Image: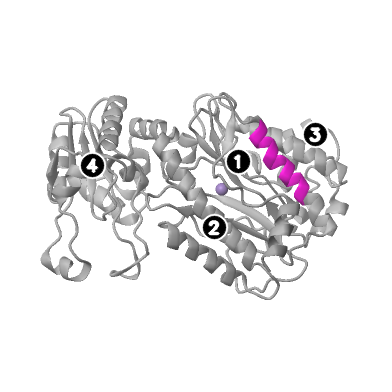
Amino acid sequence: MFDTATYIRRRNELKKLVKEGIILLFGNNESPANFPNNGYYPFRQDSSFLYYFGLQRDGLVGVIDIDNDRDILIGNDIDIEDIVWYGSVESMDEMRQRCGAHETMPMKALKTICNEALGKHRKIHFLPPYRHDIKILIFDLLGIHPGQQKDAAGMDLIKAVVKMRSTKEEQEIEELERAAVIGYKMHTTAMRLTKPGVTEKFVSGQVDGIAHSYGSMVSFPTIYTQHGEILHGAPSMNILEEGRLVLCDAGAETINNYCSDNTRTMPVNGKFTQQQLEIYSIVEACHDYALKIAKPGMKYADVHFAVCRLMFDRLKELGLAKGDTEEAVKAGAHAIFLPHGLGHMMGMDVHDMENLDQINVGFDEETRPNLEQFGTNCLRMGRRLEAGFVVTDEPGIYFIPALIDAWKAKGHCKDFLNFDKLEAYKDFGGIRIEDDLLITKDGCRFIGKDRIPYHPKDIEAFMAANQ
Ligand SMILES: [Mn+2]
């Protein structure tokens, strides 16, 4: 948790932006995995609640009454039986002091607050809920059916929260740097343990343990798979095989829930084949190119397409693609290799604020998403970059057999793709390289002092030294 002044300042800024009414910020509750007292571990607070109140306990709601300038922390003090099982925890009043709220009220007061506000026809703002218990609570409080809550959520509040959380404060950047240190340990652990004969689950489990040991948890379920072409492929009991590539996409959350998100792709036996090197060097060039060109004022969609054009040019040299690069990328031909966007915002959520809807986070009035074209419709971040934004730079090249077959059968983009040559890559898998970019005043830099090895020579040297 940051200092008390941080949360007071943020709530005051939020009041200025939203202007009137009453804001409800719901903290998360414990979430049962298989029975009520066996929750998913560790407890994960809602990120916007954390941003404005900083408190990690379950069962809290923040009420910000803009018109009366009152910040109220809602929740119940624990009783003696809880103390027996869980130890003594802070009282509501102690938590109120830490976040600088004006007063506390028990949970039952929330209904009264809402009834009064509804009676006076005051505007009640809340963010789109993503957990079912919160949806039921909102239904109880405001009478809005869960199916209509996304539309009923306040656009003024969403815009204000996105505006504030998009630009990272200095102390938030320090947290992101701490997350990067844990991410480095996770990925170098994966590189050390990767060898023929062990299972994917074994390596990914060790990687997850690093996140739990040094921070709060993983920032998303770890991807560690020899099927890199399956974008969100989960680790399986498959055994790592000589000659294959393995893709590791993993990150950590610090104790204060700031994230890291990196991807490395490495040869199982520690030595790239010529074919793997050829594709790898293209992804590597794309990854470095984004670092070179991303800067304030530039649309991240333009960085994405610049990377796509570079990738396409290089794939033409290999004979996998053909034709005019500009036209090919316009037609979406590159998406057979790269069916996702170059990156996403990152902060307290690995896909930052994705619960507020990506169209509100990665796009704006000026930059609208293209929802029609395959691949381009997956861009999570398109709008102009600003100093203080943190985005991921994660180009990849994938050979997805089902997609190759489907496009070939339809003749889709046949003027730009050499389907016959692609046949030889159907068992290749996929390569992605990912690091996290902080946009600075005049350009950008990677977060994390130590780069996880990603040049092929560095990966090979690291793996050779750590067998
Ligand atoms: Mn990512």
First in sequence, mark 1 or 4: give its number: 4
Closest to the camera, between mark 4 and mark 2, is 2
Tell me the CA gap for discs 2 and 1.
Answer: 34 Å
| 119 sits to left or right of 260 | left
In the rendered image, the residue lying farthest to the bottom is 197
Q: Which residue is mark 2?
A: 185
Q: Of the numbered discs in the image, which one, if any, rests on residue 325?
A: 3
Stretch in magenta: 280-292
Residue at disc 4, CB closer than 8 Å to ligand 1: no
| Label 3 CB less than 8 angstroms from ligand 1 | no
- Asked whether the beta carbons under mark 3 and mark 2 sit within 8 Å of each other, the answer is no
Q: Is residue 208 magenta?
A: no
Distance from the alpha carbon under mark 1 to that under mark 3: 20 Å
Q: Position of residue 294 (x, y in %)?
A: 62, 31
Determine contact: label 1, label 4, CB under 8 Å: no
Q: CA distance from mark 1 to mark 4?
A: 40 Å
Kind of residue at disc 4 = Cys
Three-letter code for the amino acid on which mark 1 is drawn: Asn
